[in-house]
Amino acid sequence: MERKITCIICPRGCPMTAVIEGDSVKVSGHSCPKGEEYAINECTNPVRTVTATVRVDNRRDVMVSVKTENPVPKGSMADVMAQLRKITVQAPIHIGDVVLEDVFGTKIVATKEIL
């Protein structure tokens, strides 16, 4: 199977081709080893950093931006969002505060300060 991938590691945006044969992935079109690694990971275990907002319960019409501390499996993004829709936080909240523990092996942290 052949897959076209645009590298997102740096601004160059190399157009790459990944050829997948069994457990082997051969990449062409990359300008650096990081691009090759990105393409292999994208074909074998794609992950994403999830960014979202969570309602601040003790402030009127206020949301706090949050993100996963580490990337999660791409197929789990909808499940992460479902968990985030169920929670609220209390101000004050600071950048880096943990909003939710152990979501697919990582934490959800605040990326904004609400005093």
Image (spheres, grey):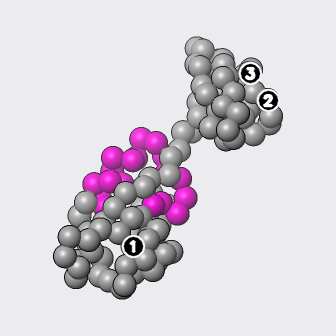
Q: Quick check: is 77 in the magenta stretch?
A: yes
Q: Is residue 78 above or below residue 17?
A: below
Sequence-first disc among 2 and 1: 2
Q: Main secondary structure of the magenta part?
A: helix
Q: Quick check: is 74 in the magenta stretch?
A: yes
The answer to whether marks 3 and 1 mark residues whose Cβ atoms lie closer than 8 Å is no
Q: Is residue 92 above or below residue 69?
A: below
Q: Give the residue at x 50% y 52%.
A: 49
The answer to whether residue 39 is seen in the rendering is: no
Q: Which residue, given by chain and number where applicable, does mark 1 sit on? A: 99
Q: Position of residue 17 (x, y in %)?
A: 66, 19
In this image, 112 relative to 86: left or right?
right
Question: Which-is-in-front pick, marks 2 and 1?
Answer: 2
Q: Amino acid at mark 2?
A: Ser
Q: Give the residue at x 54% y 39%.
A: 46
Q: Which residue, given by chain and number where applicable, does mark 3 sit on? A: 29
The image quadrant that residue 38 belongs to is top right
Q: Is residue 88 above or below residue 44?
A: below
Q: Position of residue 23 (x, y in %)?
A: 65, 26
Q: Amino acid at mark 1?
A: Val
Give the Cα distance between marks 3 and 1. Answer: 40 Å
The image quadrant that residue 75 belongs to is top left
Q: Position of residue 110 (x, y in %)?
A: 44, 70
Residue density around tag 3, few if under 14, some if 14–19, many if 20 or more, within 10 Å: some
Q: Amino acid at mark 3?
A: Gly
Q: Which residue, given by chain and number where applicable, does mark 2 sit on? A: 31
Q: Circle 1 sits in a helix, a strand or a loop, which is it?
A: strand
Q: Which stretch did the figure color magenta?
A: 67-84
Q: Viewer-proximal residue, 22 or 64?
A: 64
